[in-house]
Image (spheres, grey):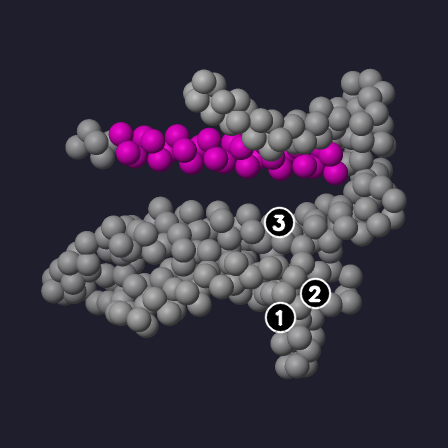
Amino acid sequence: MKKFFARFYIAIILLVLYAPIFFIGVFSFTESKVLGTWTGFSTRLYTGLFSNENPGRESLLGAVENTLVIALVAAFVSMFLGTVSAIGIFNLRGRKRQAIQYLNNIPMINPDIITGVSIFLLFVFLHVTQGYATVILAHITFCTPYVVLSVMPKLQQMNPSIYEAALDMGATPVQAFWKVMVPELKPGMISGFILAFTMSLDDFAVTFFTRGTIGLETLSTYIYADARKGGLTPELRPLMTLMFLLVLVLLIVLNVRSSRLATKKLGR
């Protein structure tokens, strides 16, 4: 009975998580403008998403482009800053290390709306014109702690004598960092990059408060503005489906690659 209820519980959780995504995917293959109304199988929404004849295509794809550019830049920069910060925190000792780790965890626990308002007030106080740059800076700010959290376990697993041995063999600190530490930390850095990219891609509150009044739209703010008009653009359904499939394929590739690397290490 315990196994039955455990499996039943997992099945319910998976159903609640994936049923809405499956629902959107199914209704992306119909022309109905109202989600939930089936008017027959059609790929018109997919063709309309990439067709120049669609009047709303340019603004939607522009929001997607802004979202991807901001997420990629924020993820790359936060990956570098988070890795360097994790190394610095790891080299601290005693209460200093615990205190900094605690401070690093606060932004992740802090509600997004508080982070967004705080950064907005900071930019206003500094008289910084809000726009593309402020959104990227804000995203780097709340993404970096996630990278630190991803890299720290790899630092704890790494043998510190390897870095010291590289220095003893004549390598400079920069060479030892790139050729010794980075390969050891690469799995954590990649995980942190993906996590930062996902968090930036998904963010609404911080973007909303730091984008200013220049008309900058990301996917989250576009959907928010679209929903306030009384409904969602039908082309959002195929876009969401394609994004989900892309993430699914990426996760499968990463998991297969990780399992192969683990098999090779066991074989050795």
Give the percent coordinates (x, y) of residue 71. Answer: 58, 53
The number of callouts visible is: 3
Residue 85, visible in the rendered structure: no
Residue drawn where x is 73% and y is 68% of the image: 212
Give the structural element (helix, strand or loop) at label 1: helix
Residue 218 to residue 45: above or below: below
Give the percent coordinates (x, y) of residue 224. Answer: 77, 50
Give the percent coordinates (x, y) of residue 123. Answer: 65, 75
Give the percent coordinates (x, y) of residue 204. Answer: 67, 55
User: Mark 2 or mark 3: which comes first in sequence?
Assistant: 3
Q: Are marks 1 and 2 in contact (CB under 8 Å)?
A: yes
Q: Are marks 2 and 3 in contact (CB under 8 Å)?
A: no
User: Mark 1 or mark 2: which comes first in sequence?
Assistant: 1
Residue 244 to residue 219: above or below: above
Circle 1 packing at 10 Å, graded few (<14), some (14-19), many (20+), is: many
Q: Which residue is mark 3?
A: 202
| Tag shown at residue 209 | 2
Quadrant where the N terminus sits is top left
Q: Are marks 1 and 3 in contact (CB under 8 Å)?
A: no
Please tell me whether residue 256 belongs to the stretch shown in magenta.
yes
Residue drawn where x is 81% and y is 46% of the image: 227
